[in-house]
Image (cartoon, grey):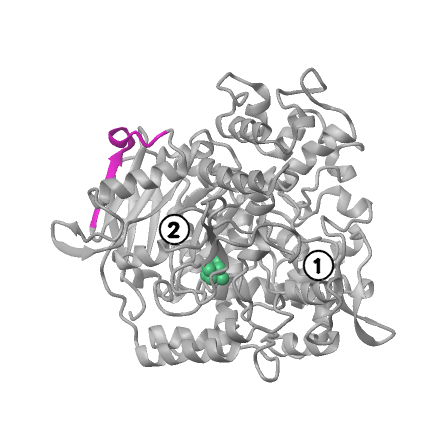
Amino acid sequence: MDGYAGKILRIDLTNRKTGAFPTSDYGQWIGGHAMGSAIFFDRVKNKTIDGFDPANVVTIMTSPLSGTLTPAASGRTEVQGIGVQSYPVGWYTRSNFGGRFAAMLKYAGWDGMVLEGKADQPVWIDVRNEDVQIRNCKQLSLWGMDTWQCQQTIWRFVNGGGEYGDWMQINTRGGQTTQRPAVLAVGPAGENLSRMACLIHDAGNGSGSGGFGAVWGSKNLKAVSVIGDKDIHINDPKALMEARLWQKRTYAFNLESLKKNYVSTEFQSPPVPGVLWGWPPGSGRPTSGQRPQACIGCHSGCRARFKDRLGNEATCYTTLFYMRARTTEIQRMASDLLNKYGLNAHEMFVGSLYLQELHKRFNAIGPGKEIDCPLEFHNYGTQDFLRKYIKMISYRNDGKGKKSQFGDTLAEGFVRAAKAWGRLDGTTGDLETGCLQFPFWGLPVHKPPTLQLEWGYGSILGDRDINEHGFDWLKHDPVISKRFGGKPQATAEEAVRIYTDKMVPFQGDMLMLDYSDGNMYSEHMVKLVTWHRYYTRFWKQSALFCDWRWPDFLNLYAPDKIGSTGIAEPKFLKAVTGRTFSFKDGMELGRKIWNLDHAIWTLQGRHRDMVHFADYIYNRADRGLEPMVLLPGRRNGKWEYLTMPARRIEKDKFEGFKTRFYKIQGWDTATGYPTRATLGSLGMGYVADELETNGRLGKA
Ligand code: SF4
């Protein structure tokens, strides 16, 4: 199988055994999320277990493109299993991180890794090509270390000392490399089972969502280290090189001829380190002493490393988390602390806004207050506050080593904490008033769910905040242009046409991207959400094209502004694997994966009656955290970028939307359960059998 290493590694932590099975057993799923879900389905017999149950299985998967020259697709890794972050149910969920782990796993000869059971004491896994050892943490005193200390200690151990760049022998069978291992580790937050704990690789690649850091902690697993020197056989290396050059020359930015309005669409975007802390221009924030940093094989380099070493590789919420810091330096330090302690920046960011509301609006939190805690909120923004706060959540204590109910409660996540404080239920509950902006499954708001509908609907119909930015630029282009007095790179009508022309199998239905009030619950909106679920499940989460750069819809660098999506994805897959697999085939496999995931959630207990936003989404006009939103829509029959006011989702109309959505999926509209006819048509009769055995098969 060209593009594959050929084997998947199995780690049985309980019995301290390792094994392997051929990747070809799951070849029809191609890679990443698809393979992970299929493996999870087969290996976890009782899908109703809690995420902390030793029987929970965590898969770490690559794709055939991992470790190859495919641009913005080589360095992503997909993580799956039952999560512990969502509320009230810990759904089967996913997360994803960049860097070089996926590539190194394949160079060591493995397409993925299946983690099962629970070790009787803290361990780490040492993979050197075919040699795999489950080692006790004790020897290197790893348990208790932060994620950076842990990685550095493992590097030194595996490389046998010396300098970075020295040659090392990988194992006794030979094999030489100048690389150091790729390590994925949990910090103190994971060890202490904080539900916001994540997995960290290198300085700032975080598998953030789902609480997988805590799941590893519960398995007594501190880290996985991989190093290898094997080849990945590419079916047609010349075609791959030509495809990369074609993509880069035709669609990517060129630093020497950057377009003025450059923060616009996906594939064309230049490195954005300046956006993190040196933007907007003229803000007085530091812009010198930084250089772009990229995941392996990526042309883009969307993160930065800094001369003063603060905030390396931080992106997105990690940079924003402590945005009311007294200085930019403290803000950058905050992102490092999150990565070292291994905490999910997104929940920490939105959760911190909640605590500030409790302080400012209700005067309800602080020493001796209704929510008694050692944090002095008038010190918010200082380094002292920051360190204490992060330690409390990571160690479940008072931030200074003493037991603390507050730290223990907060480590459970902000929604569970609100419940423990008696603030969740009833008509004045914080999810009812919107004081706590956690709109779906006890998870924090990201893009405004009432405005950017593919995001809101996609999240509530799935398992987590989708965190998929494919349609973001429809909004960013007009917003950024307006803010800086320029023109969007395309009119609303032009942009909508370019996007929807590519949305196979619903191509040409422009109404899919009409975000106006009258179209919120329509068949067209159902198609948009459906397309997005299928595209991301396969092309992004299974083939592992990076979310920051794909899909490539509207592109300022292409002569006609038409990006490469639809042509590029299958072109790269074919060059690497030799497989003729069309864009539409990928969408169909996305449909299959989406159905499999939905079947797993159904087995976990999901029914359509549970599929609802937090009450504030229905009760009050909301715009999330964004002050200005412009989205395409029709007014008086004409397309324009509409200035979106705060709005609510109407509960009964959302019910109608759900019915239409379930119908197009071929699911039982009364329960939301999958049906035998649909699963059978996708070759998943065995999934229907398991649903039937558990009384959860839908009626046709
Ligand atoms: S765009 Fe950024 S996150 Fe994505 S692969 Fe490239 S460097 Fe990594």
Q: Does 133 sit left or right of 367 as displayed?
A: left
Q: Amino acid at mark 2?
A: Ile
Q: Is mark 2 within 8 Å of ligand 1?
A: no
Asked whether 662 falls inside the magenta stretch, the response is: no
Question: Range of the magenta residues?
Answer: 131-143
Is residue 230 something that shows in the picture? yes
User: Looking at the image, which residue is at 16% across and 56% down?
Assistant: 175
Q: Does 171 sit left or right of 428 as displayed?
A: left
Q: List the residue tagged with mark 1.
A: 452
Query: Which secondary structure lies at badge 2?
Result: strand
Asked whether 139 falls inside the magenta stretch, the response is: yes
Considering depth in this image, is 645 or 523 the residue closer to the camera?
645
The quarter of the displayed image where residue 518 is located:
bottom right
Give yes or no for contact between labels 1 and 2 (Cβ–Cβ under 8 Å).
no
Residue 505 badge:
none
Percent position (x, y) of residue 307? 45, 49
Q: Does 141 sit left or right of 45 as displayed?
A: left
**How many neighbours does mark 1 have within 10 angstroms: few (below 14), some (14-19), or many (20 or more)?**
many
Question: Which of the image's four quarters has the C terminus?
Answer: bottom right
User: Looking at the image, which residue is at 42% across and 78% down?
Assistant: 245
Q: List the residue tagged with mark 2.
A: 60
